[in-house]
Structures are given as C-alpha cells and as structure tokens.
Image (spheres, rainbow, N blue to C red):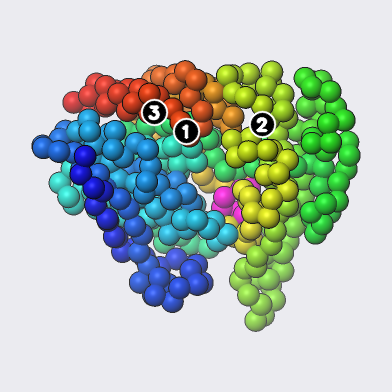
Amino acid sequence: MSEAELVVIDVQPGVTMESQSGLQALRPRIFGALMRPKGQGTGTAAIVMHPTSNFMGHYLLEPLAARGIACMGLNSRYAGNDTMLLMETVLQDLGAGVKWLRAQGFGKVVLVGNSGGAALSAFYQSQAESLTATTFVDGLPTHLSQADLPPVDALMLSAAHPGRSRLLAEWLDPSVIDEADPLATDPAFDLYARSEPVPFAADYVARFRAAQLARRDRIEAWVWGRLRMLRGTPGAPSDQTFLVYRTHSDPRFLDISLDANDRPVGSIWGDARTVNYAANAMGRFNTLRSWLSQWSSASQADGPACLARTSVPVLLMTHTADGSTFPSTAALWREAGRDRLTEVPVVGGNHYLAGQPALVTQSADAMEAWLQRVLH
C-alpha cells in the first residue's frame, strides 16, 4: 500500500483566539491524510473525522483504500484541544473536506462516523440537507451557508456515540458538591467508594441518573447567567474559561449487567476512577460558548436527532464488546435511521478495535459490500 498523501485545506477564521498561533489564526488550515486506492478504484471517497481526535492515522484508511475506496482521515481545527470547540464551526471544516474531495473528481463521498465522529457526521448531513444552524446555541451567528456544506451520499457509523451532550449527561459525576473543589464529594453518589453493592439496585441507578441531570442543569444555569452578565457589562470579554471536574462516572462502567453487552468491567481509557479524577478528561476545560455548543442540553449536535432529519442510507456497525457505547445507544440510532439503516454487529469488537485486526478487516469488508449495494 502506498503512503498516505498529506492534505492541507484553507478554512475560514473562527472565534477570536481560537488558536494561540498567530499564523493559524490569520490563515487557518486543517490537515488530513488521504489514502488513495491503487488503480482506478471505485470513484468513491470516505472521510473519517472526529470533532477533536487526530484521525490522520485511523485504522480504516488502508483497509478501505485496499478495497477501492479512497479514505481521508481529516482533522478539525480543534484537533487535540476542545476547550473552545464549537460544533457548528467543525461543520465548516468537514464541509471543506467534502468540497476538496469533490474537486478531486470523486463521484461519491461518504462519511465514516467513528466514535464521537458519528454525531458529527449526522449533524453535518442534517445541515447539508437543510441548514438550520444559522446561529450558535448562545445566539451569535454561525455565518454558515449552504455552499459550505455539500451533502454526502451515505453515512457509515461505527462504535457510534450519540453525541457529546448525551455522553456527558450519562458520565457526569453527581457526587461533586462544590464545582470549585475537585475532591468535594457526596458519599451517597460516589460510584467509586464501592459503598453500593454491584449489581446496583434499580432505585439507586434512577437516583444516580437524576442527580447527574441535576448537576448538569446547575452548570448550565451558571453558564447562561455568566454569559448574560458578561454581555451586559460594557468592556467585559465575550467569553471565559472554566473547569468541570469529574466527568467519568457511569454505573455501567462497574455493573456490566446494566445495558449488558460483551464488555469487560471498567472504562475504555483504563481505570474508571483514575479517568474521573484526571487533570484532563472529557469536558474538563471549557469556555461558556463551547460548553453550550458541545455539552449542554441545548446542543444542536445530538446525533440521533440529527440523523432523523437526513435522507441518505446509513450503515451502523455495532461493536458488541464496547465499553462506551451500549445496546441502548444502538437503539437510539436504529430509531432515528428506521428503514434507511442497516445494522451489522462486530461481535467481540471493543471501542477502538484495538488489538483486533480481524475485526478491522471484517468492518472494512462490511463497509465495502454495503457501499456497493447502496451507491452502485
């Protein structure tokens, strides 16, 4: 297989100080790695992209190219740092990638929504078909136009998270009693104190879930209040940063009878308690605006809701040993895709298919077969 081709795409400037690099701020660019098939190929190209992860070395690039499907791992401008990430701006980056592939002469372009890229892909296609995200959640204009968002021909979702807002609502630690203190804890909801026996009682899980939503709502109320205060104060900045501690606490990490699949106990990132208390973790560093766009209940990037507003064929690859997507997650996508959706189980697949080369091959085979059926 040939080496991946570096792709450099100019994009429009985003928010003030989105990057600390003056060069990137004045001439913002995104970067990708394109693996072309040998020979003529199928004329189809895929983009695999995540809001913040570096997908230039994604495990599907070579396998799809070997099957005649050009595949580009594309990074957003927020790769490696989602502190100021606005989901609506990521759409612009993904659209720039789609336009670039179209300009290369690919007749069909599809999106591979892997992990957190699934909700992004659904959000993108919903806006490409009917642009409604003309303002950010906080009310400022996105300056998106339909020309920024050429629609794609199909969506392939793999180990698919339903969206950052849903994920945080299910992972936020409800035992936090002081947002300024990473150690302040209500023992009644300290999942890792092991005071509650496993399997957890249904009543405990219900109270835990309610407490998670209550904490999220408190954070959101503070964010909205702080944003109104800043905008009502002459000379004040338009945004500010803040921390959200302990964002990795879900009863399903410890009790695998909840939303049961083939996963082992724990987190996909290692010991769940360690991840929960880590200096950097999901949703840890934020601005008021980025919180509203990514993590809040008002986020416009809810994956299943967006998918329901699309019209293209959808492939759902369900990893049955995934410790961060579950049977209930797949059910959300199924309901949204309805008769447009084909589901293929990847039996025994962990979230990243790490150490599972045979399942990577199986996934690429399934994607190739499905694309031949729906696009040709």
- Say which of 336 and 376 sits in front: 376
Residue, x 61% and y 53% (percent of image)?
292
Residue 120 shown left or right of residue 285 in the figure: left
Q: According to the image, label 3 marks what residue?
A: 357
Tell me residue 197's x, y (percent): 84, 23
* Circle 3: element type: helix
Tell me residue 271's x, y (percent): 68, 38
- Say which of 128 and 284 sits in front: 284
Residue 113 shown left or right of residue 182 in the figure: left
Q: Quadrant of residue 39?
A: top left
Q: Assess disc 2: are there few (<14), some (14-19) or many (≥20) residues with their C-alpha within 10 Å of its C-alpha.
A: some
Which amino acid type is shown beneath numbered disc 3? Pro
Residue 184 shown left or right of residue 133 in the figure: right
Q: Main secondary structure of the magenta part?
A: helix
**Contact (CB < 8 A) between labels 1 and 3?**
no
- Say which of 82 and 219 sits in front: 82
- Specify the label residue 64 is tagged with: none
Q: According to the image, label 2 marks what residue?
A: 266
Say which quadrant the C terminus sits in: top left
Which amino acid type is shown beneath numbered disc 1? Ala
**Contact (CB < 8 A) between labels 2 and 3?**
no
Q: According to the image, label 1 marks what residue?
A: 354
Q: Earlier in the sequence, mark 1 or mark 2?
A: 2
Say which quadrant the N terminus sits in: top left
Which amino acid type is shown beneath numbered disc 2? Gly
